[in-house]
Amino acid sequence: MARLNMEWEHAQMKVAEVGNRRTASNMHFAVLQGELESLARQAEWLRSQLAPASQEEQLDGEE
């Protein structure tokens, strides 16, 4: 019976360990997703800054 209890406790520890790893993985994914969204906003801002300059260059080329 004592051995069965030890095996049960070991199994519970393994389940908790896997759960902790999964939680850490989910948190890491959330951080990466936030960074990706931030980069997308920065790229959109850069695109908006470059768009007027490229339109001016096109106008200069037409003259």
Image (cartoon, rainbow, N blue to C red):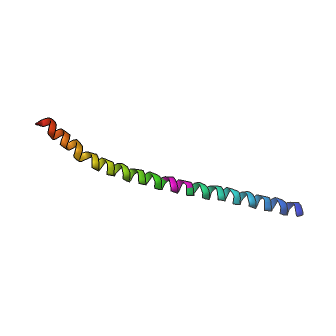
Q: Is residue 53 visible?
A: yes
Left or right relative to 38: residue 15? right
- Name the foreground residue: 1 vs 25: 25
Left or right relative to 5: residue 46? left
Which residue is at a point 75% across and 61% down the rendered structure image? 12
Which residue is at a point 15% across and 40% down the rendered structure image? 59
Q: Is residue 58 above or below residue 20?
A: above
Which residue is at a point 41% across and 50% down the rendered structure image? 39
Residue 35: x %, y % from top left: 46, 53
Label total for image: 0
What range of the chain is rendered magenta?
28-32
Instruction: Tell me, yes or no, whether the highlighted magenta stretch contains residue 31.
Output: yes
Q: Is residue 1 visible?
A: no
Left or right relative to 27: residue 45? left
Q: Is residue 2 above or below residue 44?
A: below
Residue 52: x %, y % from top left: 22, 47
